[in-house]
Image: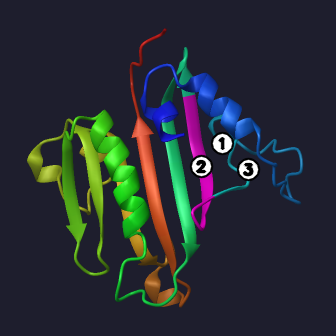
Amino acid sequence: MLRSIVEPGGKTDIENLLQTSHQNHSSSDPTDSALMPYEKYFRKLYSYKGFELSIRYLTTKGYSVTGCDLQFKRPSQFPAPFLNRNRKLIRELAKLLRAFYFDNCIEVKDQEYGGGQLHFNVCSPSYCWNSSCSFEEWQSECALYNEPYSSGSTNPKDTDIRNDFIIIRFRKENPPLS
């Protein structure tokens, strides 16, 4: 699936794969009319290696994917926070992305929980290369975020719930049309 996203011409492959899964409908929006066009796969149910997989954003142009946000999520459990349980999948995803981007990569580590970020095809100046800068500030084509033992977007002081997240963000401004 990742190859279909980052390689030119992958639109048909990724859409065929994403059409095969069941749609999870919301009781407050059973027709999905509240979803934006780029969220058409948001309520699909996927799993991969013990993670729930969400396609939060998908855009295409011509035969290529121009934008995609993938989120892998699973409940944190021991040995977290002492050991990053995401390492195996991060290695697998990073290997695929490094091969595609010819190791054109900048890595930023998060010392607190053993997570970090990998950014590929970065256009920003080096002063933006830190974990507090947003994906947009990095101006990277693709980023792989490793967030073990995370409270997600909730303030960690407001919840005891922790999940392991892996997030891939991809944006390509001008893909080939063929």
Q: Report the residue that reaches farthest toward the left.
A: 126
Q: Are marks 3 and 1 in contact (CB under 8 Å)?
A: no
Q: What is the three-letter code of the residue carrying label 2?
A: Arg
Tell which of 175 and 130 is nearer to you: 175
- The numbered mark, 2 or 1, whose residue comes first in the sequence reads 1
Point out residue 43 in the picture as x, y percentages from the top left corner.
73, 51
Report the side of 147 relative to 138 (left or right): right
Residue on which the image places disc 3: 44
Which residue is pictured at 38% across the width and 60% down the height? 90
Q: Is residue 26 magenta?
A: no
Asked whether, in this view, residue 3 is left or right of residue 99, the answer is right
Q: Which mark is residue 39?
A: 1
Number of the label disc, if any, that sits on residue 87: none
Q: Residue at x 22, y 39 (%)?
A: 122
> Foreground: 20 or 156?
20
CA gap, disc 3 and disc 2:
10 Å
In the rendered image of this protein, does residue 160 appear above or below residue 107? below
Residue occupied by mark 2: 56
Nearest to the eye among marks 3 and 1: give it: 3
Give the amino acid at mark 1: Glu
Q: Earlier in the sequence, mark 3 or mark 2?
A: 3
Q: Can you give x and y, in whole percent of width and height, for residue 133 in the image?
A: 26, 56
Q: At 29% from the left edge and 58% from the top edge, which residue is drawn?
A: 117
